């Protein structure tokens, strides 16, 4: 992995530790398998997007060999700090990775102190689009084998990335928000 080409400013291993809710969400053997697995690296990362440092996760094979792996850009749901990539998400993404994929996911720029400024598809869509050159810099990722998946707000981010021409072969949206005006009337801020 060429970190300079990936433009990551921070990369470190993340261990999988679920909360009590997470332990009850998954069958115990599945959780233990994810926690004890050694074939994939789960890495916290920071990458550059529009001059900002944005956090995310990269799940990659520990030894990719000479294979050209397909990759999925995962777009998370939630707003600001709510819905950030957590251990429950990591286990779900690991299950996809073990089916033969590299996974990269952004926490988007509006977290922590800037969480209340979340734009929901404004400048933060660049955080998704900037994952494409990051993936392309990995010599074990097949250049024409990029895919995208988004859940809830991540579905809306997927729709917007597609609208902007993100070069993926296919996209999956799970419970994506497609009408923000109607969604705003339905779900008022608390």
Image: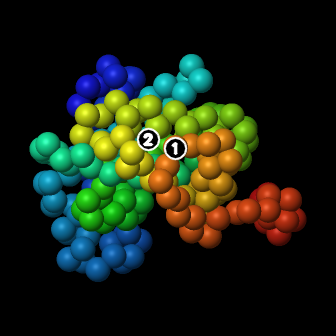
Label 1 environment density (alpha carbons within 10 Å; few <14, some 14–19, many ≥20): some
Query: What percent of the width, then of the height, locates residue 132?
Result: 46, 37
137 left or right, relative to 105: left
155 left or right, relative to 139: right
Query: Would you name the residue on which mark 1 appears?
Result: 167
Residue drawn at the location 33% of the way across and 51% of the way down: 70
Label 2 environment density (alpha carbons within 10 Å; few <14, some 14–19, many ≥20): many
Residue 96: name its quadrant. Answer: bottom left
62 left or right, relative to 123: left
Label count reads 2
Query: Would you name the residue on which mark 2 appears?
Result: 56
Query: What percent of the width, then of the height, locates residue 61?
Result: 20, 48
Residue 44: name its quadrant. Answer: top left
Q: Alpha carbon of mark 2 to alpha carbon of mark 1: how far?
A: 20 Å
Q: Is residue 28 visible?
A: yes
Quarter of the rendering occupied by the N terminus: top left
First reached walking from the N terminus: tag 2 or tag 1 = 2
| Numbered badge on residue 134 | none
22 left or right, relative to 69: right
Quarter of the rendering occupied by the C terminus: bottom right
Which element is circle 1 on?
Answer: loop
Residue drawn at the location 44% of the way across and 41% of the way down: 56
């Amino acid at each position: 992995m060429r970190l300079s080409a990936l433009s990551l400013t921070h990369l470190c291993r993340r261990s999988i530790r679920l909360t009590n809710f997470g332990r009850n969400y998954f069958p115990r053997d599945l959780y233990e398998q994810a926690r004890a697995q050694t074939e994939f690296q789960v890495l916290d990362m920071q990458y550059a997007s529009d001059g900002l440092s944005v956090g995310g996760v990269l799940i990659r094979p520990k030894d990719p060999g000479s294979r050209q792996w397909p990759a999925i850009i995962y777009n998370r749901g939630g707003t600001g700090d709510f819905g950030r990539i957590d251990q429950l998400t990591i286990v779900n993404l690991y299950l996809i990775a073990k089916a033969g994929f590299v996974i990269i996911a952004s926490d988007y720029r509006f977290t922590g102190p800037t969480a209340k400024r979340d734009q929901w598809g404004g400048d933060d869509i660049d955080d998704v689009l900037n994952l494409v050159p990051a993936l392309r810099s990995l010599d074990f990722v097949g250049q024409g084998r990029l895919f995208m998946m988004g859940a809830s707000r991540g579905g809306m981010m997927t729709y917007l990335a597609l609208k902007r021409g993100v070069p993926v072969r296919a996209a999956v949206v799970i419970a994506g928000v497609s009408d923000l005006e109607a969604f705003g009337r339905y779900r008022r801020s608390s």
